[in-house]
Image (spheres, grey):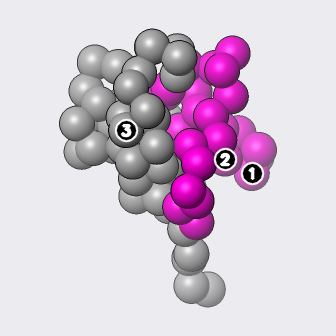
Amino acid sequence: MRKIAWMGQRDDLYPWLSVRDNVMLAARLGGQRPDRARADALLAQVELAGEGSARPASLSGGMRTARRAGAYSLSGSAGGADG
């Protein structure tokens, strides 16, 4: 099966979740066990290392849209343990 990632124009982050938890959300919804280390590595790839525990409101608009969406797209299973 071919995997496809969607990267929309808006960041669509849940404000009550941390940046890391937003990245790992699809894994949770898909019944996978989220992998915090993998999510942090993905955030580092898009220059958000150290921002995993931050709330989306504390990031600039560009950081929220481009980098978080990029990390989500890169993740395949969005931070899942078997992704």
Disc 1 to disc 3: CB gap under 8 Å: no
Q: Nearer the viewer, mark 3 or mark 2?
A: 3
Position of residue 71 relative to residue 4, above or below, is above
**Span highlighted in magenta in the image:** 6-31
| The stretch drawn in magenta includes residue 18 | yes
Horizontal relation, residue 55 to residue 40: left or right: right
In the rendered structure, which amino acid carries the disc numbered 2?
Ala
Q: Earlier in the sequence, mark 1 or mark 3?
A: 1
Position of residue 4 relative to residue 40, above or below, is below
Horizontal relation, residue 5 to residue 63: left or right: right
Residue at the disc numbered 2: 26
In the rendered structure, which amino acid carries the disc numbered 1?
Gly
Residue at the disc numbered 1: 30
> Dividing the picture into quarters, in which one does residue 3 lie?
bottom right
Residue at the disc numbered 3: 62
Front residue (pair 52, 8): 8
Q: Secondary structure at mark 2?
A: helix
In the rendering, at what x and y percent does residue 46 appear?
27, 44
Q: Secondary structure at mark 1?
A: loop
In the rendering, at what x and y percent does residue 9 appear?
56, 56
Front residue (pair 64, 46): 64
